[in-house]
Amino acid sequence: MASLTFDPTYAPHGGRHRRQSVISRPGAVPRPVVAEVATILAGLGFGACVALAVTAESWKQLAAPGGVTMFLGNLSGLAGTYLALIMVLLVSRVPMVERVLGQDKLLASHRRLAPWPISLIVAHAVLLTFAYAEAARTGVWYQIGAFIRSYPNMLTATVALVVMVAIAVTSVYSIRRRLRRETWWAVHLFMYLALALAFTHEIALGPSFVGHPLTRFVWSVLWASTAGLVLVYRFGLPLFRTLRHRLEVVEIHPEGPGTVSVICRGKHLDRLAVAGGQFFEWRFLTKGMWWQAHPFSLSALPRPPFLRLTVKGIGDYSSAVARLRPGTRVAIEGPYGAFTTHARRRSKVVLIAGGIGVTAIRSLLEDLPRDCDPVVILRASSAEELALASEVAELVRHRKGRVHELVGSRSEVRTDRLSELVPDLQNRDVYVSGPEEFVNRVVATVLRLGVPKDSVHFEVYSL
């Protein structure tokens, strides 16, 4: 029996080819006020932590040998730890925040913030070593040995510091690009261990904690709240959805050179709220793949009991997807992403996809209103690599829009042609998805051509 290209109005082969109605739940509407409140609370929390550190010191303590250095060391440690917790919260995938900002913006904030907590925690270790050495009138190297030999929880704090520095080093772009994604991801998991070790050290030895029950209470609540959010949204909710929907692979369908669609079947998908343009973290429960999750966009809105993703083999994991066997169980996290119709500011849109970025564009098209007059630009190196192009063309035809297929090398297909292809570009919302370099180039171009920043939305596909 011939396999069907996944027109979302049909079930995959292996049964009767019957039309499916669109009965999946629409994606939740973002509420920007939630992100604004979260930002205000984060700022107030930082101010409160600094204030507690300052009020814990007395003039007598500051006047003692090494007192000022010790105070600066304590302050930098508390500030660094607080910012480290904020970093964790930025990637904890709290739905109400994530659907407003999207993972791209949250990860960008995470990366911008990253140097500060690591630098402050290193400064904390250095300043306190000098402060204790000055107070005890000993050398710095002798004091380091005394810390490790005689102070409770100091060894765990040292381990935590080493782990944090290692994570910071592997996050440097020139180093990260040489690492496999799986290796980088595994190293980052140790941040949870490092923060747990740091907390036991602070409670036991921190001058701002010892004899200060209010400070201990505030920080305990802070740590417990952070741990709770991580456990609920990074582990609990994905586990619940995986068990509830019980997805399994039913078909692997080739879409082009190195590109396949994976059609999954599950239960209760009518209760899974998904917006076009969103993605899931997929974990295929088979040998060599079960322990890691990778982000792939849905290439069509759910048609219960079916769900489809489309993947281009770029790295080891994405290439292995094409070899999955029917019956493979699937665990999911999500849906995630703010690359949805809810981000629109104007009635008309331009959708620009580079390579496999067509997947998000394809599902987003289904969610857009029929009067949005879409202009879709599909970019690929060859005609064979224009995956899902016929499906995109059909969706655009129903919305009385236009499709432009730009095929060729980068020198042959330039982004400065956008104003020719879309004369009213400045009056439209622009959605861009694809590889990072492509997205950055197109976004810079449309901004230069006068499209307001709040009308530009993008989704980056990277290893």
Image (cartoon, rainbow, N blue to C red):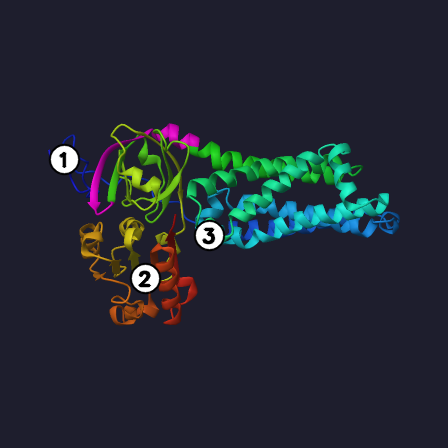
User: Is residue 403 shown above or below 191?
Assistant: below
Locate residue 169, reporting x and y percent: 55, 48
**Label 2 neighbour load within 10 Å: few <14, some 14-19, many 20+:** some
Place residue 402 in its image quadrant: bottom left
**Residue furthest left as drawn:** 1
- Residue position for label 1: 17
Q: Nearer the viewer, mark 2 or mark 1?
A: 1
Q: Which residue is mark 2?
A: 347
Q: Point out the tag, 1 or 3, that comes first from the N-terminus.
A: 1
Q: Which residue is mark 3?
A: 101
Residue at the location (41% across, 32% down)?
Answer: 291
Q: Amino acid at mark 3?
A: Leu
Q: Which amino acid, mark 2?
A: Ser
Q: Are marks 2 and 1 in contact (CB under 8 Å)?
A: no
Percent from the top left, x then y, of residue 152?
Answer: 74, 32
Kindly check if marks 1 and 3 are in contact, taking CB atoms under 8 A apart as contact.
Answer: no
Side (left or right) of 347 relative to 45: left
**Quarter residue 304 falls in:** top left
The quadrant in which residue 239 appears is top left
Q: Amino acid at mark 1?
A: His
* Secondary element type, mark 1: loop
Give the structural element (helix, strand or loop) at label 3. helix
Question: Which callout, 2 or 1, points at the residue further toward the start of the chain?
Answer: 1
Q: Nearer the viewer, residue 143 or 106?
A: 143
Part of the protein shown in magenta: 239-258
Disc 3 + disc 2, Cβ < 8 Å:
no
Q: Secondary structure at mark 2?
A: loop
Mark 3–mark 2 Cα distance, whole angstroms, equals 21 Å
Query: Who is closer to the viewer here, 163 or 390?
Result: 163
Residue 427 visible in the picture: yes
